[in-house]
């Protein structure tokens, strides 16, 4: 989760072009205008699209939603030294219990559940590895095996202990660092939707850097029209969605070439390396925190293990895309 610079922008748009969004769920010849608001948060651009007649009320609600996102950035950021997450990571050297805010405890509790259920395919303790690979991508230099091994030695979700009764946490390995890049944006978008609803703005969609949280459908529509994965030239389907969330994770578009080998920006917690699978998964789930964390887990699990795992996830679907010889193959997984 990177630094961000605030820049609030409002405009009126007739066609959605968010990262995985294309248009409202209307006929191709119908053109509806929506209010669009953008600001930078958590190292990426957040976009709100609102179907509402009162621009003043919509702008007030949008600003309140972005204020909520900025508040949560001070909780979840691993770049800001004074964020609540950074202070928790720093406590690893004393291994003392730390009292947490409701927001941070909720995210860590949910994330630890996903970590246990996936045997560590989702791991919020990869902060040292994340930092190592950020430097590698910036310098375009492969990190040494010694550095990878040292970072791996300071990783492991079982070193994060939570105490639900007191909402405390303790890190039991000195130097371990937390990274919520695979879960925090989804939770933040959930909170933004709640803020918009309080302002009477339920017909909306939130794009948190590619993680979508979707409210009520626009007027005269069954839902917001989404292209799975956002790959315009792929055979992935369009979906009409409302009151749910969609998150995409993968390396089909985001990668770096190091020493002649292609590595994803996503890290495999088991090898300490960037993923090399040339795959992407889009998860449709009831909430942003669920979609975000499951997408992060499933891209590491792969298709076959994800099929078994997602059987126990209610109201959840997955669309896996795998690039083979320039073609993108699509696999659909539905929960039982």
Image: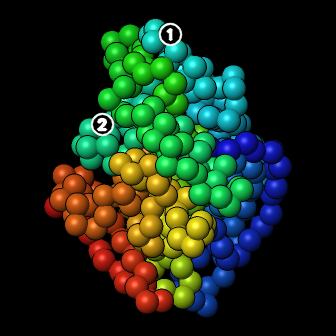
Q: CA distance from mark 2 to mark 1?
A: 25 Å
Tell me where residue 248 appears, x and y as whole percent.
47, 63
Query: Which residue shows up at 26% across the image and 60% down it?
Result: 306
Query: Which residue shows up at 44% across the image and 67% down it?
Result: 276
Report the front residue among 209 and 145.
145
Q: Which mark is residue 94?
A: 1
Relative side of 17 to 26, left or right:
right
For mark 1, does the 10 Å Cα neighbourhood hold few (<14), some (14 to 19), or many (20 or more) residues?
few
Report the front residue among 31 and 317.
317
Q: Secondary structure at mark 2?
A: helix
Instruction: Report the coloring of the rendering.
Output: rainbow
Q: Which residue is mark 2?
A: 113
Is 31 placed above or below 13 here? below
Query: Which residue shows up at 68% across the image and 44% down it?
Result: 2
Q: Earlier in the sequence, mark 2 or mark 1?
A: 1
Relative side of 153 to 256, left or right:
left
Report the front residue among 3 and 210.
3
Tell me where residue 212 appears, x and y as whole percent.
53, 58
Report the front residue among 282 and 325.
325
Tell me where residue 180 appears, x and y as whole percent.
51, 39
């Amino acid at each position: 989760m990177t630094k961000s610079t605030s820049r609030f922008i409002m405009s009126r748009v007739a066609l959605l072009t968010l990262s995985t969004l294309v248009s409202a769920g209307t006929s191709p010849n119908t053109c509806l205008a929506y209010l669009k608001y953008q600001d930078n948060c958590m190292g990426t651009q957040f976009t709100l699209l609102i179907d509402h007649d009162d621009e003043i009320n919509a702008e007030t609600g949008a600003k309140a939603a972005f204020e909520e996102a900025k508040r949560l950035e001070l909780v979840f950021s691993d770049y800001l030294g004074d964020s609540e997450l950074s202070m928790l990571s720093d406590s690893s050297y004393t291994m003392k219990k730390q009292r947490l805010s409701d927001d941070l405890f909720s995210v860590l509790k949910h994330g630890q559940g996903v970590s246990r259920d996936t045997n560590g395919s989702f791991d919020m303790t990869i902060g040292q590895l994340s930092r190592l690979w950020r430097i590698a991508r910036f310098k375009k230099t492969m990190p040494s095996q010694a550095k990878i091994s040292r970072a791996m030695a300071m990783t492991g979700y079982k070193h994060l202990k939570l105490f639900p009764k007191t909402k405390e946490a303790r890190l039991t390995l000195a130097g371990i660092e937390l990274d919520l890049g695979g879960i925090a944006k989804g939770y933040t978008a959930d909170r933004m939707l709640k803020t918009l609803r309080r302002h009477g703005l339920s017909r909306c969609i939130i794009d948190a850097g590619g993680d979508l949280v979707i409210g009520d459908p626009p007027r005269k529509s069954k839902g917001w029209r989404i292209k799975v994965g956002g790959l315009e030239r792929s055979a992935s389907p369009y979906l009409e969605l409302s009151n749910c969330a969609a998150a995409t994770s993968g390396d089909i578009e985001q990668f770096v070439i190091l020493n002649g080998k292609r590595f994803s920006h996503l890290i495999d917690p088991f090898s300490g390396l960037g993923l090399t699978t040339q795959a992407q998964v889009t998860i449709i789930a009831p909430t942003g925190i669920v979609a975000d964390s499951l997408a992060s887990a499933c891209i590491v699990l792969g298709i076959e293990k994800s099929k078994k795992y997602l059987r126990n996830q209610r109201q959840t679907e997955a669309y896996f895309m795998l690039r083979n010889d320039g073609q993108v193959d699509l696999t659909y997984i539905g929960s039982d």
